[in-house]
Amino acid sequence: MIQIQVWADFECPYSYFQTIVLEKIQAQHQDRVEIVWRAFELTPVDGNILPSKFYINTFDEAKLEPIVVNEGLELLAPKFLTYTWLAQESVYFANSQGLSLKLARALFDAFFLEGLDIGNEEVVMQIASQSGIDCQLLRQALESGELTKHVMSDEQEFKTYGFQGLPAMLIGEKDFSPKSFMPITGYKTFDELSAIVLSLNI
């Protein structure tokens, strides 16, 4: 089985696109590919802040990607950036239930298509519930602090691997050492990522 570990941020449009591609990869290869969500937060702030000029320019460039038209994405320019740690912890929790991609996609949709505040606990819980997550178990896991430790570890590993941007991925045989995995930085289209997966002879 091929494992794809993906680091992504919920306010990064290219991370959004990568999640959509990963959904398609998983649908195509089904039980031959496992997707594992890893956390990295681009805007580690408390509360909401206005998007920077750099962010706005990046967003405008991202809107030109073919996937936007192909998927019919009506992207809304974010009016604010927020603290997405809760969203990251929730998707990490969803890994254990095989629902990480589903929840991640729903959170991205909420942020980029509906303009919702995914730093708000009730918003995240509602989206998690609609994605099939047991919110009682999720709340227990959040309160225990264990998810925070895992997310902090993910962010440290991101730096250890020397990734320079998001999204970032490690791809390789699940039962092999992570050291043998192929590191990939930056958004890959479905065709590009499919070619990489097929080259691993799954």
Image: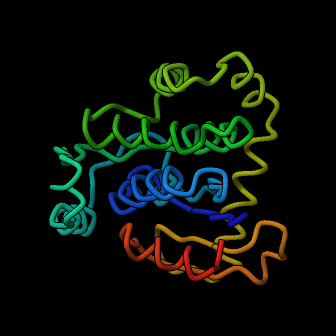
The N terminus - image quarter:
bottom right
Outermost residue toward the top?
Answer: 136
| Spot occupied by residue 14 in the image (x, y as percentages of width and height) | 35, 63
Which residue is at a point 84% across and 76% down the rendered structure image? 177
Compared across the picture, whether 133 is left or right of 78 comes to right
Compared across the picture, whether 144 is left or right of 34 comes to right
Viewer-proximal residue, 190 or 80? 190
| Spot occupied by residue 74 in the image (x, y as percentages of width and height) | 16, 44
Question: From what the image shows, is residue 32 above or below residue 188?
Answer: above
For the image, the number of numbered tags is 0
Compared across the picture, whether 2 is left or right of 125 comes to right
| Spot occupied by residue 112 in the image (x, y as percentages of width and height) | 28, 43
Location of residue 111 by image quarter: top left
| Spot occupied by residue 120 in the image (x, y as percentages of width and height) | 46, 28
Q: How is the image coloured?
A: rainbow
The C terminus - image quarter:
bottom right
Which residue is at a point 37% across and 41% down the rendered structure image? 48
Which residue is at a point 38% across and 58% down the rendered structure image? 12
Location of residue 183 by image quarter: bottom right
Viewer-proximal residue, 160 or 35? 35
